[in-house]
Image (spheres, grey):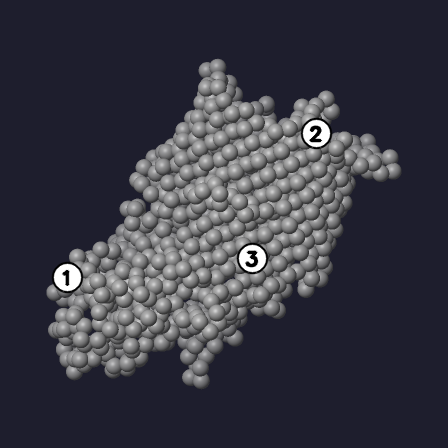
Amino acid sequence: MKLKKIAQLIALIGVVSPVLAQNAQPQQVIQRVEITGSSIKRIAKEGALPVEIISRKQLEEQGIVNAEQLIATLNVNGNGSDNLASNADVTSGAQRGNNGASSANLRGQGADSTLVLLNGRRVATHGMKGSAVDLNSIPFAAVDRVEVLKDGASAIYGTDAIGGVINFILKKNYKGLEASAFTDVTEAGGGNIGRLQVTGGFGDLAEDKYNVLIAASTSENKALRGDQRDFVNTFQPNRGLSVDTRGAPYANVFATTLGDTILSRRSNTGPVLPGTTQAYTGISVLDLPGGAGCGSVDGMGAYDEKLWDVATAGFACAWDTGRAAVLQQPVENSNFVARATFAVGEHQLFAEAVGSTTEVAKRFSPNQVSPGASTFDARSFYPATGSAYNEVFNAIAKVFPSIEANRGLPIAYRWRCMECGNREIVTESKAGRLQFGADGPLSIGGYGFDYKIGLSHAFSESESTLGTGYQYTAALRDALGSGLINPFLKAGAKQSQAALDLIKSASAEGVVLYGGKTILTAFDASLSGEVYKLPAGPVMMALGTDLRKEEYEFNGDRRAAAARPAILNAAFDDTNALPNVSRDIRAIYGEVIVPVTTALEINLAVRQDHYSGFGNTVNPKVSFRYQPTEAVLFRGSYNEGFRAPSFNQLFNGVTESQYAGKDLADPAKCAGGKVDSTKPGCESITPVIFTGGKDTLGPETAKQGTVGVVFEPVRNVSANLDLWEIRRFDTIKSVSLTDMLANYNLFTEQFLRDGSGNVLAIDQRWVNAGESITRGLEVGARTSGKAWDGAWTAGIDGSRLLEKKSRPLANAPFGKSEVGLFTFTGDLGLKWKHTAYVSYKKGDWSGLFQNVYRDGYIDQVLPGVASGKVVPTNYNAKVDPYSIFHASVSYSGIKNLTLTAGVKNLLDEDPPFAITYDSNTGAGSSWEPRVADPRGRSFTFMATYKFL
């Protein structure tokens, strides 16, 4: 985490930032400013669109030092898999390639439908995925405030602003030099956060006709491991949760078709107990009668065959992958911004460079090795010459005498290679933007206008490199087959030095996994001003154009094609490699504000975008603002949106991966596709899953509306209520297996079968499928007053999700509501969220007390519970709400020095218990990272000193 990392970025500014109301200098003439959500400069006031403004002071009081932390506090932001904690383990499908990226997700519409702006203009999307902005690239040290437009804005900013707009606005005309240091230390240890920043500026636009701003920061989030928090425990069968992995530090012995082994001769069926018919495979010596017990080895426990409805695993052990996950990924980030502004008469010229470097080390569970044609063949089996052979064979033969005939055959097994180390993928991202621009007044035909123009070039480049925990497949296979490595070590025993040397010699650390780069080149120009006088006021108009070129490239494996030995479970994504693809977007837009009466004004906007490869799209927006009295304001809007497929969705190759879960049955033979081993045809299947791009994808469209009221009955008391709805059509999605199973008659072609009618594969590639409806209510109330010679304020902002449902195809019925219901990936639809606060200021002292609340929801249900075969003793179908309190106090009584100290999670609330385990990827555990903060109580301290 060094300041020298700040170099290498380029990204620049230009033009006036949309929303400079609070920065306007006191003048005799009221200055018009541009508001987020509109291109027309006007006097700042409560507008037709709901815009939330978060000041720098508010950020500091809450101990928020980066954009990801801010987004997590916004009630309007969805609870999606867009943060680093949600992608901290094995991931699949659309989440692949998110290494090191953190994104915004307004109104739960997805990161690629939320527009993130810096000073009112676009930045490059994350280099790895190419579809959403990485929040780590925002130069937070220089941010003056953040404006969140809680409404679609496709008609103003572009077609992808369906969920809303987040506009990070940097300081302007800043003079002085200040430095600040921040630390956030957890009480329980692990996951500490620190930041250093310096901000300097000189020159005054009014007096000196120039201003230069330079800001730099460096920050670090320390890792927080799962084994550092007691609430992480995936072995809680009494509550309906257990681990579905038999890759354990003490290996489970398996039957396999790859060769003759002690359990079987080229068969997946294991031995049976004398006098019974139930076959067993995945047998652990520890779990057999008279064995030491699965819990004798740290992190292991008995495999719960009843919860997972897998009777063949009755003598197996499992291992808690959640404990090995990293709950807060380690992140090192440096940001830099330099801007020069010049006043030439009434005009301003801008030049700005912004850049960032971010390094994220994703660390998760050690690899498991198991017999399989794609990984290890019979050469990996534990030989009869191994030191533990007789001990393992004799223990199993004592319970299953039928295997005595197989003595001398090797052992096929599934083992968690703890000595290989936790898997680590280190992703380094560099982002930058260089921008030039100008704005000022312009007279045309006697009419006065404001113009603004900008030219920018932005990029984001990411590269993921393998760290520890990855081995070359063939080398590790041969090492295991030597018998020197013992996968059957009991508690306290260690591998020999020769075994450790073999494992080390197979290491693939340092190999570049994959990388990507996005480039954005853009030009924009707009003109706004009064065009006509009406009795109720002037008619305001804006015209503009937006021209940009988007480029993307992705490499799947940078090693020479002739020298690419396989690396165990390392997803190189060679099928997704793209040399360079690009598209041009040309847009023109217009906007007009018409004061119909002194109480009613109408805002009309329309934008035409031309996408190369997709043609033209026209998206209108109409909004109104009606204020019949000083105490009441009614507002509303209707707009349409359009989102072209991302480069990945269009051009990714087809990836094949084996379904590893035990909860999937053939829907043609078993209604609903739910596993039930007692019903013929409802046995568990593990087909190949096809994911990837499709170049025939079309765009998705949206229609949305908002209607609301702002009420201010007396001075210092106000409340607001906004009802909104978003409908999306031809949505680009990878249809979930749940939807495919529930609507099998609509997706029969996606189930690929062999000549006997058995499912071989399921096609889950991107499609334009169906539609979705999301509806919600946003409410807020604020009040203030005087007390004890000081001033206090209090308020609450809440979000109520009224509806969230979708259908996989246009001719399919809508599924059940997803409000308050667990989903594996994507947005978790919490019914209610709020943030309430009370602040007080007296003299040099100020304080803040805050409550953050997230509603509970119906939990995931494991197969055994779903089928009714087992009822856990302490099972609760609903996850409890998550409610935490923060407090902070600031003191500015020392000249040039401001001190802020705080406590986050004052009552040290753990995340509520939740069944988030995903057997298909091995991710998740006993808490929900889309909702809760795993760090627990922490203490924050910030010191800011002004040198000039």
Sequence-wise, the earlier of marks 1 and 3 is 1
Q: CA distance from mark 1 to mark 2?
A: 80 Å
Residue lying farthest to the top in this orientation = 789
**Under tag 1, what secondary structure?**
loop
Residue at 30% over, 40% down: 188
Q: In the shown orientation, is residue 161 left or right of residue 900?
A: right
In this view, the residue in front, 532 or 757, is: 532
Decide: is 789 above or below 677: above
Ranked by sequence position, the earlier of labels 1 and 2 is: 2
- Report the amino acid beneath label 3: Lys
- Is residue 545 or residue 830 the one in the foreground? 545
Evaluate if marks 1 and 2 touch, with contact meaning CB atoms under 8 Å apart.
no
Front in this rendered view, residue 135 or 635: 135
- Name the spot of residue 519 as percent of width and height, x first: 61, 55
Which label sits in the foreground, 1 or 3?
A: 3
- Secondary structure of the residue carrying tag 3 is strand
Q: Which mark is residue 209?
A: 2
Residue 476 visible from this viewpoint = yes
